[in-house]
């Protein structure tokens, strides 16, 4: 076969084994470097945590790749980038967290900048003056994951401390603020978290945090009051000074207490709302049981009388002033001050005896008031404090007053009033001032007469002064005349000497005549006769 002959002439092929070449040492180093790079990249990817975004109101103290995120003193992340938001009102920071923080990143996770802060008497964050600002973290309890957060303006005051949040209502804030301490029996039991004005603008909502175990003592009947400053009370037993602590004097505070009960109430639920009273006495004032409103019309000054002033009967407070509405009667040209008081004797433990049986409460109240008014019950204003001038309403019995019948068709019923001791004092002072004015006028006339007398006396003294001056001059002249070296004195001496000689001659003559009296007739012997 020709075809088979052709193929038989083709040379037979053989399998030649491939020669193995050795790897050059030049490639070892790149391969090792590539392997190391892959290992580093894989390790970095495996160790890289989640990336989150935090929105801050300001970038003060924040630095990319430097500001840390710390929880309980341990670093759990770091800011990697910081930029200004598109609205130019916020700062957006990107943070790289550690891998094990993924479960922490829930919806109620809270971030804030830790820096030096002063709140009341509390100073925090002083360590950041040296180490720099860092971002604090408070873990949340939500189960919903989140990667974008809004930082708080200030650190949360409750932290991770167990306790409950309550809400207080107050008409004014006073010295309260964030961080103001809460006291229970003079022990610090919490602090004020925040406060805000109510939507209606009538009061403020103060959010407080009471930590465990003190939160169990907050029941639905607990009373809260403002414990700021010092409470000074002067009573019959002496002077009492009470305060919660020195810090409450300087920075304010809130105290709470629960009235004793036979069966204690269960602890209040978190978020319960309470009224914040101004002082402890008001907080523990008994609640109204059966209040009745009455109208008192005063025709005198009510300066010093305020809403809330007590209504007192025989030293026992039985009510308080609720309204003061001054009015003017154009026809009578009379100014009066209607005052509405709320009286509730049962609220203060006053018990009625010997009431008619079978009557209801309304009839009993009318019977009691009609009986009291028939026996001279009247209301009057009295001074409660001489220093402040505050007034209160006193209800006393005046048997000499004419009986008055109450008109129960009025609402509220008007009770009789009587001018208080204030007007009597004012009248007495007025009369005293008038008498004093008369006395002053009379004294002024007496002083005028005395002034005229003094002028006359002054003139007399002037004349006397002139006479004394003349006498002085006369004495000076007389002194000049009788001076030892004066001419008058020499002449006087001569005159005296001559007088002395004449006196001696007369004495000789007298002696001679005494011996020879006849000489008066005959003459002296030996003398020639004429």
Image: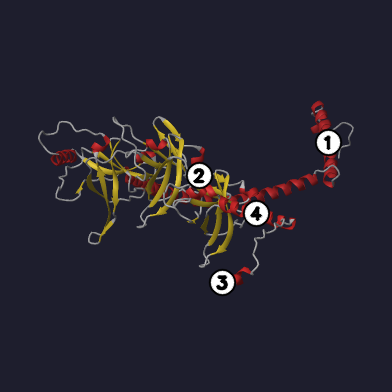
Assess whether mark 4 and mark 2 are in contact (beta carbons under 8 angstroms): no
Viewer-closest of 52 and 56? 52
In the displayed structure, 411 sits above or below 216; it is below
Residue beneath the point at 36% across and 43% down: 270
Disc 1 versus disc 2: nearer the observer: 2
Closer to the N terminus: mark 1 or mark 4? 4
Q: Which mark is residue 99?
A: none
Closer to the N terminus: mark 2 or mark 3? 3
Q: Which residue is mark 2?
A: 251
Q: Which residue is mark 3?
A: 1
Residue beneath the point at 51% across and 40% down: 247
Closer to the N terminus: mark 3 or mark 1? 3
Q: Which residue is mark 1?
A: 500
In the displayed structure, 41 sits above or below 225; it is below
Assess whether mark 3 and mark 2 are in contact (beta carbons under 8 angstroms): no
Q: Position of residue 155 (x, y in %)?
A: 51, 49
For disc 1, the neighbor class at 10 Å (few under 14, some 14 to 19, many from 20) is few
For disc 3, the neighbor class at 10 Å (few under 14, some 14 to 19, many from 20) is few
Q: Position of residue 43 (x, y in %)?
A: 60, 51
Assess whether mark 4 and mark 1 are in contact (beta carbons under 8 angstroms): no
Task: Measure the alpha-carbon separation of dots 3 and 1.
Answer: 233 Å
| Element on which disc 4 rests | helix
């Amino acid at each position: 076969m020709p075809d088979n002959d052709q193929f038989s002439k083709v040379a037979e092929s053989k399998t030649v084994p491939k020669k193995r070449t050795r790897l050059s040492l030049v490639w070892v180093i790149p391969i090792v470097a590539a392997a190391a790079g892959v290992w580093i990249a894989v390790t970095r990817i495996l160790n890289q945590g989640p990336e989150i975004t935090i929105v801050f109101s300001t970038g003060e103290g924040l630095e990319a790749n430097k500001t840390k995120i710390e929880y309980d003193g341990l670093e759990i992340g770091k800011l990697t980038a910081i930029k200004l938001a598109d609205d130019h009102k916020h700062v957006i920071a990107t943070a790289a967290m550690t891998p094990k923080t993924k479960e922490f990143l829930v919806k109620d996770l809270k971030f804030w900048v830790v820096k030096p802060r002063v709140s009341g008497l509390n100073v925090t964050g002083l360590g950041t003056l040296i180490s720099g600002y860092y971002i604090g973290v408070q873990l949340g309890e939500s189960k919903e994951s989140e990667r974008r957060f809004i930082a708080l303006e200030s650190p949360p005051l409750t932290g991770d401390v167990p306790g409950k949040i309550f809400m207080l209502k107050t008409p004014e804030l006073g010295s309260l603020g964030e961080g103001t301490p809460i006291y229970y029996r003079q022990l610090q039991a919490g602090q004020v978290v925040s406060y805000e004005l109510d939507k209606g603008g009538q009061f403020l909502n103060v959010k407080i945090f009471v930590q465990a175990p003190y939160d169990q003592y907050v029941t639905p009947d607990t009373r809260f009051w403002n414990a700021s400053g010092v409470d000074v009370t002067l009573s019959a037993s002496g002077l009492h000074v009470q305060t919660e602590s020195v810090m409450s004097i300087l920075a304010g505070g809130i105290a709470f207490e629960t009235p004793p009960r036979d069966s204690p109430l269960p602890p209040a639920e978190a978020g319960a709302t309470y009224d914040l009273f101004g002082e402890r006495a008001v907080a523990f004032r008994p609640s109204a049981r059966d209040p009745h409103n009455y109208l008192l019309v005063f025709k005198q000054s009510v300066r010093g009388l305020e809403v809330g002033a007590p209504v007192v009967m025989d030293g026992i407070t039985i009510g308080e002033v609720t309204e003061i509405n001054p009015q003017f009667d154009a026809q009578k040209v009379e100014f009066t001050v209607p005052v509405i008081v709320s009286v509730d004797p049962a609220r203060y433990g006053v018990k009625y005896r010997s009431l008619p049986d079978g009557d209801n409460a309304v009839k009993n109240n009318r019977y009691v008031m009609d009986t009291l008014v028939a026996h001279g019950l009247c209301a009057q204003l009295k001074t409660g404090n001489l220093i402040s001038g505050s007034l209160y309403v006193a209800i006393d019995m005046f048997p000499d007053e004419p009986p008055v019948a109450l008109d129960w068709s009025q609402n509220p019923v008007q009770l009789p009033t009587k001018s208080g001791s204030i007007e009597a004092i004012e009248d007495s002072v007025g009369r005293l001032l008038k008498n004093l004015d008369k006395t002053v006028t009379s004294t002024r006339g007496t002083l005028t007469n005395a002034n005229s007398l003094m002028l006359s006396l002054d003139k007399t003294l002037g004349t006397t002064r002139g006479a004394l001056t003349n006498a002085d001059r006369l004495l000076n002249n007389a002194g000049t005349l009788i001076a030892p070296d004066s001419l008058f004195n020499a002449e006087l001496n001569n005159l005296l000497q001559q007088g002395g000689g004449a006196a001696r001659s007369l004495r000789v003559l007298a002696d001679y005549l005494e011996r020879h009296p006849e000489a008066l007739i005959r003459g002296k012997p030996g003398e020639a006769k004429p």
